[in-house]
Image: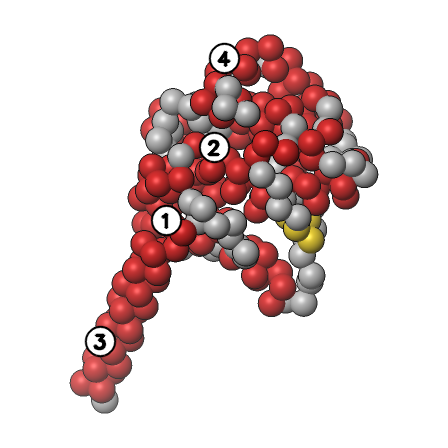
């Protein structure tokens, strides 16, 4: 009996390692493709569709997204976006002193949403950092941000900045004001509970802080704004 259990254990271990190797090989093929082709799905979108909820998403190139959105999201989510190449290790070090929260960069969130899902597993953590570096290197910062803005969730089943702008403010992502963009950025940490169109006092406070930093954003995020 014990020998049979060991055999099953070895078989499952080999199966798991082969599956992981196959998935990594697929990532190595698909990441360069996404440099030029818009991803048709993300793990989050696919999960919701599998559960019977029809996600809403309309893709918009970065050139058709208001610079106010770029400023607000980067200020709120990744202030060192133009300095690091996937992982902000200074933020990681600081986060380790505060329960490990707040260190996730835009590239890390992008690969998590696109390829890995929300599950807190060792495999996800093992892949997230190298994938963040790889995608930033292959896609570049503008493409990484473009993909992130188009796959981020901004409400139940609301994916991408265009769907979010239409859903919360009944206008296009191109036309979002600084205040509207800041409210959308304030919703990102928990888009299911935080409604950008009906902000609570905490969201308004967060948005006000983000809005006050717009003056310095042109210089801080020139790596994506200057090319727009």
Q: How far apart are marks 1 and 4 (CA)?
A: 29 Å
Q: Distance between the residues labelled 3 and 4?
A: 55 Å
Q: Do the residues labelled 1 and 2 touch (CB within 8 Å)?
A: no
Label 3: which secondary element: helix
Q: Earlier in the sequence, mark 3 or mark 4?
A: 3
Q: Are marks 1 and 4 in contact (CB under 8 Å)?
A: no
Horizontal and vertical percent for residue 214? Answer: 61, 15
Q: Tell us which disc is closer to us: 4 or 2.
A: 2
Horizontal and vertical percent for residue 37? Answer: 48, 50
Colouring scheme applied when the structure was drawn: secondary structure
Side of 219 relative to 199 (left or right) = left
Q: Distance between the residues labelled 4 and 2?
A: 15 Å
Residue 186 visible, this angle: no
Q: Distance between the residues labelled 3 and 2?
A: 44 Å
Q: Earlier in the sequence, mark 1 or mark 4?
A: 1
Which residue is labeled 4 in the image? 219
Q: Is residue 85 above or below residue 216?
A: below
Which residue is labeled 2 in the image? 142
Q: Residue at x 52, y 42 (%)?
A: 147
Which residue is labeled 3 in the image? 10
Q: Do the residues labelled 3 and 2 touch (CB within 8 Å)?
A: no
Q: Residue at x 22, y 76 (%)?
A: 10
Q: Residue at x 45, y 54 (%)?
A: 115
Circle 3 packing at 10 Å, graded few (<14), some (14-19), many (20+), is few
**Image quadrant occupied by the C terminus:** top right
**Tag of residue 32:** 1
Q: Which of marks 4 and 2 is nearer the N terminus?
A: 2
Q: Earlier in the sequence, mark 3 or mark 1?
A: 3
* Nearer to the camera, 108 or 222: 222
Q: How many marks?
A: 4
* Nearer to the camera, 4 or 30: 30
């Amino acid at each position: 009996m014990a020998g049979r259990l060991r055999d099953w254990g070895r078989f499952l271990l080999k199966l798991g390692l082969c599956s992981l190797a196959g998935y990594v090989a697929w990532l190595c093929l698909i990441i360069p493709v996404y440099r030029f082709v818009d991803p048709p799905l993300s793990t989050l979108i696919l999960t919701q569709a599998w559960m019977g909820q029809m996600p809403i998403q309309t893709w918009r190139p970065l050139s058709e997204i208001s610079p106010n959105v770029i400023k607000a999201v980067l200020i709120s989510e990744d202030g060192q976006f133009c300095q690091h190449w996937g992982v902000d290790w200074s933020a990681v070090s600081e986060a380790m002193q505060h329960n490990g929260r707040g260190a996730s960069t835009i590239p890390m969130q992008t690969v998590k949403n696109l390829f890995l899902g929300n599950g807190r597993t060792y495999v996800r953590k093992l892949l997230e950092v190298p994938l963040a570096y790889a995608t930033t290197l292959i896609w570049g910062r503008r493409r990484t941000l473009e993909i992130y803005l188009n796959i981020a969730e901004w409400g139940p089943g609301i994916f991408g900045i265009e769907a979010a702008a239409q859903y919360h403010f009944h206008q296009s992502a191109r036309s979002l004001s600084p205040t509207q963009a800041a409210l959308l950025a304030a919703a990102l940490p928990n888009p299911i509970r935080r409604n950008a169109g009906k902000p609570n006092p905490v969201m308004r406070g967060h948005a006000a802080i983000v809005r006050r930093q717009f003056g310095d954003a042109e210089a801080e995020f020139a790596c994506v704004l200057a090319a727009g």
